[in-house]
Amino acid sequence: MKNLKSKLVLFIILMLFWLLWNNTWDVEIWLYGLVPVLIVIAIFGNTANIFRGVKLTPKGFVYSLYYILYFTWALIKSNIDVMLRVINPKLPIRPGIIKVKTELKSPMARLILANSITLTPGTFIVDIKEEYLYVHWIDVCCEGDPEKPTKLIAEGFENILKNIYE
């Protein structure tokens, strides 16, 4: 059953990309996309286990939309923060690598968390080892408190991702 769920999620994602790239509601175009999508699923469907944690529920869908809004807001805030640092003549930065602990177990949730952190300016994932993400941060603070960087960088993303994947 889990494998069928992974194949279904892969099918939905591939068909959505097909529809977005073609930008039409024409049924004939849908059918042209259906054949290559089914071929890809036949070849790679058994290895699509990264989608096994996805919740195909209304709650999971709502939290996915919420995650997009949350990520967009985090992106705007971090862009403004980096912009202000760049235009400041004193350039107030303290770059460094910190260790952030994640409680996420799903491979897809960890992937989305790592990509979200990397896509927000000022942070970059350097490595992932077990439950730790090693993040290059533009303004390392909290040297005495190892929990605070986790709260500042990852906690907001993690709380939403838990509702989608775990």
Image: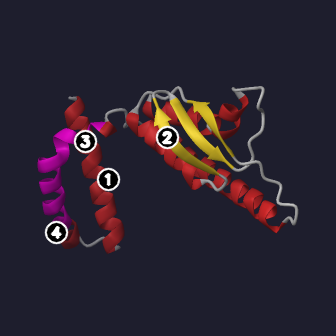
Q: Is residue 12 left or right of residue 163?
A: left
At label 4, the amino acid type is: Tyr
Q: Which residue is mark 1?
A: 13
Pair 4/3: label in front: 3
Report, in whole angstroms, how far the alpha carbon at label 2 lies from the one at label 3. Answer: 23 Å
Q: Are marks 2 and 1 in contact (CB under 8 Å)?
A: no
Depicted 89 relative to depicted 37: above or below = below
Q: Which residue is mark 2?
A: 127
Choose the circle earlier in sequence order: 3 or 1: 1
- Check disc 4 and report the residue beneath it: 32
- Residue lying at 29% horizontally and 51% vertically, measured from the top left: 12
Q: Secondary structure at mark 3?
A: loop
Mark 2 or mark 3: which is in front? Answer: 2
Q: Is residue 54 magenta?
A: no
First in sequence: mark 2 or mark 1? 1
Amino acid on which the number 2 mark rests in the picture: Asp
Q: Residue at x 73, y 30 (%)?
A: 148
Residue at the spot 54% in from the left edge and 29% down from the top edge:
102
